[in-house]
Amino acid sequence: MTDTAGTGALPVEGVPAARVLDEIRALRAGDRPTHGGRLFAYVYDPGVAGLDELAQAAYAESAHVNGLDPTAFPSLLAMENALVGAAARLLGGGPGTSAPDVVGSVTSGGTESLILAVKAARDARPDLAEPRIVVPVSGHAAFAKAAHYLRVALDPVPVDPVTLRPAVADVAAAIRPETVLVVASAPSYAHGVIDPVAEIAAVAAAAGVRCHVDACFGGWTLPWLRRLGAPVPPFDFAVPGVTSISVDLHKYAYAPKGVSVLLHRDPGLRAPQFFAYADWPGYTMVNPVIASTRSGGPIAAAYATLRHLGEDGYLRLAAVTRDAVAGLADAVRAVDGLRLLAEPESTVVCFTADDPALDLFVLVDELTARGWHTQPQLAYAGLPASVHLTVTAAVAPRVAEFGPALAEAAATARAAGPVVLPPELLALAGSLTPEALTPDLIAGLAAGLGLGAGAAPDRMAAVNTLLQAAPVRLRERLLVEFVGLLQRPTW
Ligand SMILES: Cc1ncc(COP(=O)(O)O)c(C=O)c1O
């Protein structure tokens, strides 16, 4: 009998539901573990029994609801408004605060929130031919993406190699008459440090410029950590001059992916974020966010998650996470040759290696081989290569196992020594311009690094070493080419 089902997405004859699910589960078996506290990036796991089932059921209820038209689906409007209200209240806005008129929108994620913050700032100044934004280099890469998509110039501000924060004087000096937005992070993703938000917002306000606080990562942890007694500096709408804040619910609010909130201090600031169009023969269109058709699934799932966990749930999860961060930081301190790049002040542990014999990229591979998935960060602008750990509540029960695993991985990495790439390859990476890359050269590089079509190698140290040897623009081009090799249709 011929197998008409094959393995493609569109078989000749439909496949029974149970088998389709089995196939997906088999594919998922090759993924990194989204639950269980061994993956320190990409996923946010509270480890709360029953929460996934609740979120999935809520998602299913609203998956086919379309956010395109809030009048057709008032359920979605009600849940969006409730999410915005909760985020605003948590971040210093709402009735009885100094920011009583806060409004917001639910977006698909941090990147969309940041793009829209930049769009709102840009479109509030139609008089400017060449609008610009001021962003510390520790700001999320999504600001560069926003600048690129929206044709806004990016003025990067360096960060101090010790504090990993921008100097306020440098931020002030970067503001020009064309500046439409100044950015601060609370905290930065890479290192988990909180920028001097009050000072940055003050210099922005003095120049009459909007100030966006990117709290995509920390907006749903810092307020709880503060309530638990941590010395969290002011970073939200309590700070005069902060005009907008983003907070991702699919991060530390522990909602399934596809949901973030962008808040503005008042409706006037938000207005240029919207897009309306009536100059065509179809339906009248008004989109508060980038997407037009939007699934209600992520919004309903987030709503269910917030209501189920409640303030006491988040406070409890934050306490557990805080203790896990302290335990992981101790584990790093206990390994000779490793050093915390920043003292943890949120939910990130970030460390570097002071000993050249201990190659961080090899260490990351050794941890992966032991079932611990960390995130390598390349050396950049005077900052050393580092390893990033996003810490969530599900990590807590694992902390005691992590210390010995880290020590063992470090000993193995030290014994193995740093990755040695052929000197001519390193010289090539250091000197090539992106324009000089030919398809043959890319294919040769990829093959040499084990990057086959549709698959990445188990060990990434060689890839990271090569990328690190390359100047920034070449790094970007190589990344595009390498991922282009992975994204090929299967037939
Ligand atoms: C501080 C910060 N801003 C923005 C983003 C982008 O968020 P997303 O990946 O949801 O687009 C992230 C993601 O990690 C982040 O940490």
Image (cartoon, helix red, strand yellow):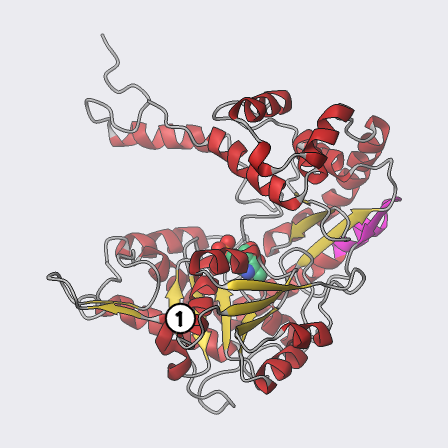
Who's the residue at 34% across and 69% down the image?
80
Residue 196, relative to residue 62: is it above or below?
Answer: below
Question: Residue 190: horizontal and vertical position, in percent?
Answer: 66, 55
Residue position for label 1: 83
Question: Residue 477: horizontal and vertical position, in percent?
Answer: 56, 39
Q: Nearer the viewer, residue 149 or 212?
A: 149
Residue 226, relative to residue 153: is it above or below?
Answer: below
In terms of secondary structure, where does tag 1 sit? helix
Question: Residue 399: horizontal and vertical position, in percent?
Answer: 71, 49
Question: Residue 427: horizontal and vertical position, in percent?
Answer: 74, 30
Q: Amino acid at mark 1?
A: Leu
Who's the residue at 41% across and 28% down the image?
488
Q: Is residue 370 visible?
A: no
Mark 1 CB lies closer than 8 A to ligand 1: no
The picture quadrant where one finds residue 26 is: top left
Q: Nearer the viewer, residue 247 or 323?
A: 247
The picture quadrant where one finds residue 258 is: bottom left
- Quarter of the image that includes the C terminus: top left
Q: Residue furthest top?
A: 1
Q: Residue 335 lies in magenta, yes or no?
A: yes
Q: Residue furthest left?
A: 281
Q: Nearer the viewer, residue 80 or 379?
A: 379
- Quarter of the image that includes the N terminus: top left
Q: Residue 364 lies in magenta, yes or no?
A: no
Who's the residue at 52% across and 33% down the image?
481
* Left or right of 201 on screen, residue 399: right
Near mark 1 (Cα within 10 A), the count class, few <14, some 14-19 or many ≥20, is: many
The picture quadrant where one finds residue 314 is: bottom right
Magenta span of residues: 327-340
Who's the residue at 19% across and 23% down the image?
13
